[in-house]
Image (tube, rainbow, N blue to C red):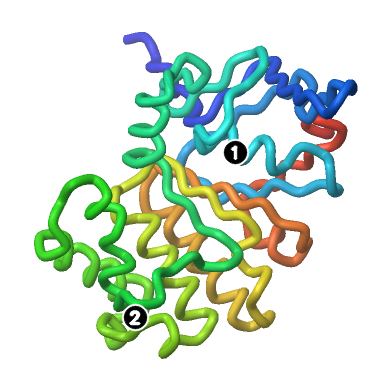
Amino acid sequence: MPTETVRPLVEAVDLVREYQMGEERVRALDGLNLTIDGGQFASIVGPSGAGKSTLLHILGALDTPTSGRISIDGVDLGALDDTAASAFRRHRVGFVFQFFNLVPTMSAWENVALPRLLDNQSLRKAKPRAVELLEQVGLGDRVDHRPSELSGGQMQRVAIARSLIMDPTILLADEPTGNLDSKTGESVLELLADVAHAAPDRLVVMVTHDPKAAAFADTTITVRDGKIAE
């Protein structure tokens, strides 16, 4: 029998992203090529201005390439219109940010359930799954606490649980340990690795300036001058 070909979860070919800055045209990504399989924790590193954030935004369907092609789990992101891109972000992408972005008036479980509320589901129906995710990230005893009653590490764990509520294909973490002390940051990185390794069809991609954080990943991708450095 023929061997089935395993398709990379992320595949970028000749990816270019240009921006108009006054009279100057800036090329943030310059023919970037990239493939990443699922079930991995990948870190993206490189100097400031190398194109890391641009790549992350395109992976999250927050931006579109000027030319070239990028697909996630077979979906061509460049071919999505605004409505389809919004639906893709809502259902297929989870985001974890440096500053947590929790709603201060909501409890931990309500913050986790919020993406489902924005997807026209009731908080009541979303609560069991939200509580389950909080238990998975070690916050089963904090489900009713508001952000002001949580430590920085606990708030980041709430944010990770929230990023998983829609069962995304790809989880994008932008400097997730930037506001945490080293010990707390390590626990968050270990959690992100566990999330990546829990499902072969899920990928966690982290942008970081911290080489110690990058070392927690299974693979490190260095971006320089808009390309993947050899």
**Based on the displayed image, in which of its 4 quarters is residue 228 positioned?**
top right
Quadrant containing the C terminus in the rendered view: top right
Q: Amino acid at mark 2?
A: Leu
Q: Which one is in front, 131 or 21?
A: 21
Q: Tell me which numbered mark, 1 or 2, is placed earlier along the sequence.
A: 1
The spot of residue 53 in percent (x, y) is 69, 43
| Residue furthest to the top | 2
Image side of residue 165 versus residue 192, left or right: left
User: In the displayed structure, would residue 159 be above or below residue 47?
Assistant: below
Q: Amino acid at mark 1?
A: His
The spot of residue 66 in percent (x, y) is 67, 16
The spot of residue 195 in percent (x, y) is 42, 58
Q: Residue at x 77, y 58 (%)?
A: 209
Residue identified by numbered label 1: 57
**Based on the displayed image, in which of its 4 quarters is residue 106 positioned?**
bottom left
Quadrant containing the N terminus in the rendered view: top left
The spot of residue 216 in percent (x, y) is 64, 62
| Residue furthest to the left | 125
- Marker disc for residue 139: 2
Q: Tell me the element at label 2.
A: loop
Pointer 2 local density, CA inside 10 Å: few below 14, some 14–19, many at least 20? many
Q: Residue at x 48, y 52 (%)?
A: 95
- Cα distance between the residues tagged 1 and 2: 29 Å
Number of numbered discs visible in the structure rendering? 2
